[in-house]
Image: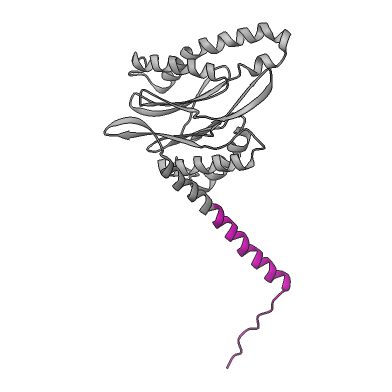
């Protein structure tokens, strides 16, 4: 199982992922291994893939070729999405065709072995873009109106929590990069603690931000990541304190405490 999150921010993009890879064969899980699920390409692109590792490796190669050959130069975001889709679809299409041939023999396992989603963060015409590609590699760009995306089997836990955080912290505009990192880390923490299995530590956070006039990808070091983990823990403690305050008010109401008015002189 996997959870990969992307948030479009006013000063860049943040992506985060859990660190558990499930190995197995013919639908049977064998082991859970730690791994990094976010790939940094050419120092300026962040790629996260939920699905077969081999397919993700081919996606990485194609995206790197598109970048190095400057095929996105001067393009608009929707044109960039189309170019990237064409580059990765040829590999996904190959596997879908193979799955159609083998499905009569192995059933739904054929589909499970090729189902793949991806999130890509990169600059297009010097503007940071966050693209999501579904199982058919159909693209969608994150916008100010819907600035977050998530993929993987942990999505059903992450999406409601991200919607909650957005409603509380940035309801009418995109967050700052710092707020985006905090939201991503807290969501990963929540999913790891809530999921019955498969989404697990270690967490990985990578940002796309402008450095010396260029958009650069940077992975947060452990000490910086720990600061955001502690911040999410403090936020949860604040919520617990609020519950204690509410409980006290409820107790007072239940006891119907009467406070006499002061006597007039």
- In this picture, residue 17 sits left or right of residue 75: right
Is residue 22 part of the magenta span, yes or no? no
Residue 173 seen in the current view: no
Where, quadrant-wise, is the N terminus in this rendering? top right
What is the number of callouts on the image? 0
Residue 188 seen in the current view: yes
Q: Where is residue 17 in the image (x, y as percent from the top left)?
A: 51, 33
Residue at the bottom extreme, as displayed: 265
Q: Which of 79 and 54 is in front in this view?
A: 54
- In this picture, residue 175 sits left or right of residue 108: left
- In this picture, residue 198 sits left or right of residue 127: right
Where, quadrant-wise, is the C terminus in this rendering? bottom right
Q: Position of residue 77 (x, y in %)?
A: 41, 23
Residue 86, placed above or below residue 13: above
Q: Position of residue 110 (x, y in %)?
A: 67, 14
Is residue 243 part of the magenta span, yes or no? yes
**Colouring mode (rainbow / by chain / secondary structure / one colour):** one colour
Residue at the top extreme, as displayed: 101
Residue 256, placed above or below residue 131: below
Q: Where is residue 234 in the image (x, y as percent from the top left)?
A: 51, 54
Q: Nearer the viewer, residue 156 or 224?
A: 224
- In this picture, residue 192 sits left or right of residue 71: right
Which stretch appears magenta?
Answer: 236-265
Most common secondary structure along the magenta stretch: helix
What residue is drawn where x is 50% and y is 41%? Answer: 185
Q: Which of 119 and 52 is in front in this view?
A: 52
Residue 104, placed above or below residue 44: above
What residue is drawn where x is 64% and y is 10%? Answer: 99
Q: Quadrant of residue 32?
A: top right
Q: Quadrant of residue 212?
A: top left
């Amino acid at each position: 199982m996997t959870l990969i999150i992307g948030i479009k921010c006013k000063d860049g993009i943040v992506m985060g992922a859990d660190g558990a890879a499930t190995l197995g064969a013919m639908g049977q899980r064998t082991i859970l291994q730690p791994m990094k699920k976010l790939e940094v390409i050419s120092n300026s692109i962040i790629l996260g893939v939920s699905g077969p590792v081999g397919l993700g490796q081919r996606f990485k190669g194609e995206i790197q070729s598109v970048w190095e050959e400057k095929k996105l130069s001067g393009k608009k975001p929707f044109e960039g999405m189309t170019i990237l889709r064409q580059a990765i679809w040829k590999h996904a299409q190959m596997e879908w065709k193979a799955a159609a041939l083998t499905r009569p023999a192995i059933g739904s396992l054929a589909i499970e072995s090729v189902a793949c989603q991806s999130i890509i963060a990169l600059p297009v015409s010097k503007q940071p873009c966050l693209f999501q590609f579904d199982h058919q590699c159909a693209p969608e760009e994150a916008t100010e109106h819907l600035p977050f995306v998530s993929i993987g089997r942990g999505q059903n836990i992450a999406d409601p929590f991200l919607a909650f955080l957005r409603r509380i912290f940035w309801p009418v505009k995109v967050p700052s990069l710092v707020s985006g990192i905090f939201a991503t880390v807290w969501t990963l923490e929540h999913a790891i603690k809530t999921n019955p299995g498969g989404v697990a530590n270690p967490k990985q956070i990578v940002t796309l931000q402008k450095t010396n006039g260029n958009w650069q990808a940077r992975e947060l070091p452990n000490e910086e990541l720990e600061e955001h983990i502690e911040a999410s823990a403090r936020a949860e403690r604040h919520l617990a304190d609020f519950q204690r305050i509410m409980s006290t008010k409820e107790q007072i109401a239940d006891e119907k405490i009467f406070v006499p008015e002061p006597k007039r002189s």
